[in-house]
Image (spheres, rainbow, N blue to C red):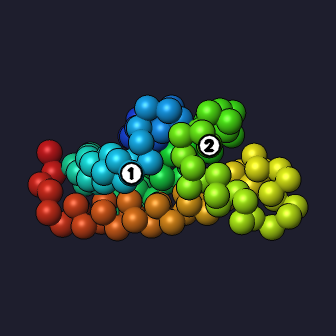
Amino acid sequence: MNWKIIFQLSIFGLIMAFGTISLIPEKVEPAFWLIIFIFCAIVIAKVCPGKFFLHGFLVSLVNCVWITAVHVIFRNTYVVHHPQMASMSANMPAALAVHPRLAMVITGPIFGVMFGIILGLFSLAASFIVKKK
């Protein structure tokens, strides 16, 4: 496992975490993530010796730690700029609706795993397309 590249690529998640608090609109965010996923997949395919899916998956898991932590810390500002997230909080079970930060901590890893599968598949696909150094 190339932990150095996993950590380095996860910095994009940290940048996006801060960017999505108030700078990047909710509707444009998926385009940013698509570009980041493609870039990460290409880098993983070029740099890593194997286990491309696992490398991509782990990048997203580390991303979810950054993103969840930043969004929990800056929750009030984040929710103001992401009304869809506020409406999701309202539809949570009563125990979680009372503690919205706890809901973010619980759902963050779920999204991390889902996007980890996507980035893992991107990385695997890129390994068939991209030439090694």
Q: Nearer the viewer, residue 30 or 80?
A: 80
**Vertical placement of residue 68 versus 123, above or below:** above
- In the figure, is residue 15 to the left or right of 90? left
Decide which of 127, 86 is in the foreground and name it. 86
Q: Amino acid at mark 1?
A: Lys
Q: Secondary structure at mark 1?
A: loop
Q: Residue at x 68, y 36 (%)?
A: 76
Q: Which of disc 2 and disc 1 is earlier in sequence? A: 1
Task: Point out residue 72 in the picture as x, y percentages from the top left corner.
Answer: 68, 40
Say if 4 sits above or below 119 in the image: above
Q: What is the crowding at mark 2: few (fewer than 14 residues within 10 Å), some, or many (at least 20)?
A: some
The residue wearing badge 1 is 27
The image position of residue 121, as x and y in percent, is 34, 67
Question: Residue drawn 27% across and 48% down?
Answer: 35
Judging depth in this view, the residue of 68 and 124 nearest the camera is 68
Residue 123, position in %: x, y? 31, 60
Marking on residue 111: none
Q: How many marks?
A: 2
Which residue matches tag 2?
79
| 43 with respect to 87 (left or right) | left
Q: Position of residue 101 (x, y in %)?
A: 75, 46
Q: Dividing the picture into quarters, in which one does residue 51 lie?
A: bottom left
Q: In what quadrant of the picture does the C terminus appear? A: top left
Q: Residue at x 53, y 40 (%)?
A: 81
**Secondary structure category for the residue under label 2:** helix
Q: Is residue 130 visible?
A: yes
The amino acid type found where label 2 is placed reads: Val
Measure the C-alpha gap from mark 1 to mark 2. 14 Å
